[in-house]
Amino acid sequence: MPEQVDVVIVGAGFSGLYAAYRMRELGLSVAGFERGADVGGVWYWNRYPGARCDVESVDYSYSFDKDLEQEWDWSEKYATQPEILRYVEHVAQRHDLRRHFTFGTSVVSAELDEERLRWTVRTDGGQVVEARYVLFGVGCLSSTHLPEIEGIADFAGASYHTGEWPHEGVDLSGLRVGVVGTGSSGIQSIPEIAAQAAQLTVFQRSANYSIPAGNKPLSDEDRAAQKAEYAERRRLARLSGGGSPHMAHPLKTLEASPEERRAAFEERWELGGVLYSKTFPDQLTDRAANDEARRFWEEKVRAEIADPAVAEQLIPADHPIGTKRIVTDDGYFATYNRDHVHLVNLRGNPVERVEAAGIRLSDGTLVELDVIVYATGFDAMTGSLDRISVTGRGGRTLKEAWAAGPRTYLGLGVDGFPNLFNLAGPGSPSVLANMILCGEQHTDWIAGLLGQLREGGYAGVEARADAVDAWVEECRERAEGTLMTAANSWYLGANIPGKPRVFMPFVGGFGVYGDIIEKVAASGYQGFELLSG
Ligand code: NA7
């Protein structure tokens, strides 16, 4: 007889940990499983040099524990990976959450017993648990993607993926290093790698928009001011599009005078990073508006790069600004002014193959390397769920149900998969917003629903097929009403060969989404079927 629990939670990142806290608070028994040896999820794995969050520390933190908000001292405006990991470890300790998880253990399957409405969950450690509910907090950027480049295994030196960086660190001093990929991970790590390596060659397929973080140490006064206004910060964050307390300019881009426009861009530039994409409310819906933001960005960035020919290569030509997540950097563009840093534009000169001695380009050049760093991203949003065999009604797997792209109702439920919930996954705004607040929002909503089920004596809940169809359509329509589909981004699955091209997140914003799910709850969970035992 397998162990019986109320809830299985998969993943002990920010979402899964909070889910354990809330489920326990509801009086439910929990069995949690986590692939890593400890808590932290994406912050456990992504230990590459320069790894940092692009949401301000004060906002990228749990909101459920008001004492913690006041007690925890962030040292910098944008926290580094080690500091975020220390924070999440502290929360696990503070609320005694580790005891709900088995670490170093991956869930391999979850199978529904339709009659009894129970899920049998199996792990790679041979554990079998039976649960009423399954909550997936497996992360949207947790399955690394290594490109299929010929000869990749032939390389004689060391190679690392940024998302699986060795925990003991890597000493790159005096070495010839190649970095493949210029997304967030590449752009954050390149200045740090350049500071160590004897030679650094960056292999860029697509140029990317990046904005200086404007990072700085926080003083006691800064922290005191942030803490005094925490409640207001959270209130504004909940209303906002991105889950941090910043609102777009009240005017549309071209309604503002040239002076106002410039001042607004300048202010966002100073704020630093990803929020630049929401300086004006129409920047991601109107091409002319987007061009204004792009021109301002371009002017700033060109001024940073000494060689105009190099600058030309580093300016994106293929997508509007903000349609891939704008990277938050620390000295990225100026790194190319250093004599030992070289840029290879793969658009003009693609990789032919990897060889023992380095990377051979199509023009015949061999770039000799001691180390290759693959900053080549993730099978985003669905990759980690795809690796679990989830079998719902009629023996249909989640993979089959999502063969043409993820299909959810509110990002939370899937028809044919009763009592199974996704935290901060596809169909929700999570990857376009503040992940921690998204995970809390989803968990709180699910906790409310499970409380209602218990009060009503129900055995479960299932998203209705028509509600899923309508939500998929709403997500599609909203995305097509923006410029977001104009980039070959991981939001669209475009970075993974053969993956269906579907814009996976809900693009309408964190605040709007929060209103929608609240209304659904207030309506008695319209779109969900409450199931009797
Ligand atoms: P990203 O943003 O997916 O970036 C991956 C990078 O790797 C990107 O520049 C890719 O170029 C490049 N790439 C992928 N495959 C190849 C091959 N085969 N050859 C050359 N270059 C390649 O992942 P990150 O880890 O940087 O960031 C993920 C998210 O984490 C980020 O958006 C933030 O939300 C935090 P491409 O653009 O596809 O041409």
Image (spheres, rainbow, N blue to C red):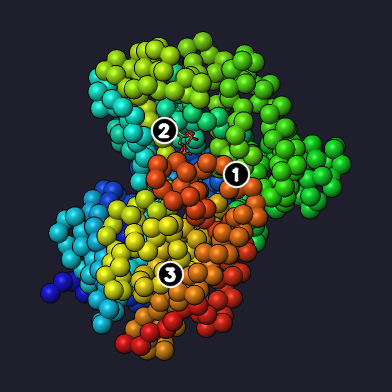
Report the disc number at residue 486: 1
**Is 145 left, or right, of 243 in this rendering?**
left
Mark 3 touches mark 2? (CB < 8 Å)? no
Quadrant housing the N terminus: bottom left
Residue 18 coordinates in the image, percent (x, y): 41, 62
Which is nearer the N-term, disc 3 or disc 2? 2
Question: Which comes sooner in the sequence, label 3 or label 1?
Answer: 3
**Nearest to viewer (mark 3 / mark 1):** 1
Q: Could you tell me how far apart the alpha carbons at marks 3 and 1 are, in whole angstroms? A: 28 Å
Tell me the amino acid under the disc marked 1: Ala
- Check disc 2 and report its element: helix, strand or loop: loop
Picture disc at residue 375: 2
Of the image marks 2 and 1, the number of the one nearer the N terminus: 2
Q: Is residue 301 above or below residue 412?
A: above
Q: Residue at the spot x=56%, y=82% of the render?
A: 523
Q: Amino acid at mark 2?
A: Ala
Disc 3 on helix, strand or loop?
A: loop
Provide the secondary structure element on which disc 1 rests.
helix
Q: Name above or below for residue 515 compared with residue 47.
A: below
The residue positioned 44% from the left and 23% from the top of the image is 350
Residue at mark 3: 413
Regarding residue 452, the answer to whether it shows in the image is yes
Q: Is residue 253 above or below residue 413?
A: above
Across and down, in percent, residue 480 comes to: 61, 54
The amino acid on which the numbered mark 3 sits, given as a three-letter code, is: Gly
Q: Quadrant of the C terminus?
A: bottom left
On the picture, is 240 further left or further right than 447? right
Disc 2 beta carbon < 8 A from ligand 1? yes
Q: Nearer the viewer, mark 2 or mark 1?
A: 1
